[in-house]
Image (spheres, helix red, strand yellow):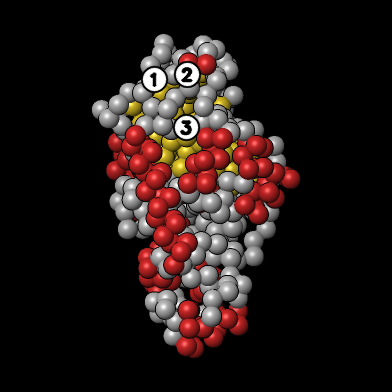
Amino acid sequence: MKRIVYFSFIIIFVLAGCHAGSDTAQSAIVDGAFKAHFIDVGQGDSTLFTLEDEEEEAVILFDTGDWQGNEVVPYLESQGVTSIDLVIISHPDADHIGQLSNVMEHFRVNEVWMSGNESTSNTYQKAMEDILSQDIAYHEPRTGEEYELGPIELEVLYPGDISGKVNEESIGIRLAYNQISFILTGDAGVKEEKEIIETSSLGSTFLHLGHHGSKTSTDPAFLDAVHPEIAVYSAGEDNSYGHPSPEVIELLDEKNIDWFGTDIDGTIVVTTDGEKYAIETEMSEELTASDKKSSDEVKQRSAEAKDQERSAATNEEKKDAHCIDINNASKEQLTKIIHIGDDRANQIIDKRPFDSLDELGVIDGLGPSRIADIKSEDLICDF
């Protein structure tokens, strides 16, 4: 059974920022032409935007899930998608670009955007080969660029330039349909969020939390600048990374921002007419929120969400107690990491600091496969 949540953009809500619970109030169904689908792809990212009305049709796909998954194509097919106007890949990590080749094999894609940062992974290399072989338009957008696709307005928030920092230099966008807007930033971190604040007007209805809800993203100042009504994160159920971070969830609650996550809610679909919106999720219970001013719309976190948060907190505490900080660890500590012997430990010490695990690719013999093993081992502290 699906859970459905209705909101009105033009009416002020008094919300206690928390995961939706089981309150029930009057509501009216929103018959909107525009939809945002935060697809449940496990520990990865993929968001589909669709517009269908009598005058305009448009399809935009932001990220394509993890390379080990096969969720995106079946989901797009279930929504009647036959072609895609624009695919945006925030950055070439395998949990964001993972199913791009499969998407291009099944649908006509008009244009692909990437940051310009490259990867040595087979997933990235094949995707680039497919773009070239299919003669698909390719673009590397930069801060301040603005585009229109019918009534959809798209502004590029980041990056202004690239320097090889794959996660940090993720493409960030603000997408608006009339009065309803969305911000997505890939895996950009707190430093990049602060740069975005300085260059863009950010107020938006929805914020897709950076880096799967990790504490490396969602700076309080950034959250204040966006001032979203709703936050959404994409993460795998029982993932080993502790996503979303309990600190981020606590911050959302403190700022009275309602939130949803694919690990708890499954695929999350927002339907809007440009003024009002409804949120539908895959859940075993139903919730509606009033479209009148009232304090009785304060929603309590469900028991399931509480359990998830406690579990994430426990996992993170355990990791913090035993993790290895590669920027400060001794040679002996570094050799405890899979694929790291004395020689590679010495190279790490010589080349640090590192801003992400992917930067370990500069170490001799550490290719994408071995870096993936290191990530899976989950011994290294978060950056």
Q: Which residue is mark 3?
A: 18
Q: Which residue is mark 1?
A: 23
Identify the image quadrant of the C terminus: bottom right
The mark tally for this picture is: 3
**CB under 8 Å between callouts 2 and 1?**
yes
Q: Is residue 134 visible?
A: no
Q: Is residue 89 above or below residue 166?
A: above
Q: Amino acid at mark 3?
A: Cys
* Residue 42: % across, % down: 35, 49
* Residue 201: % across, % down: 70, 37
Give the mark nearer the N terminus: 2 vs 1.
Answer: 1
Q: How many neighbours does mark 2 have within 10 angstroms: few (below 14), some (14-19), or many (20 or more)?
A: some
Q: Is residue 126 above or below residue 57?
A: below
* Residue 312: % across, % down: 40, 50
Give the mark nearer the N terminus: 3 vs 2.
Answer: 3
**Mark 3 and mark 2: Cα distance apart in space:** 11 Å
Q: Which residue is mark 2?
A: 297
Say which element carries label 3: loop
Q: How many neighbours does mark 3 have within 10 angstroms: few (below 14), some (14-19), or many (20 or more)?
A: many
Nearest the viewer among 181 and 231 is 231
Nearest the viewer among 371 and 289 is 289
Say which element carries label 1: loop
Residue appearing at x 47%, y 32% in the figure: 18
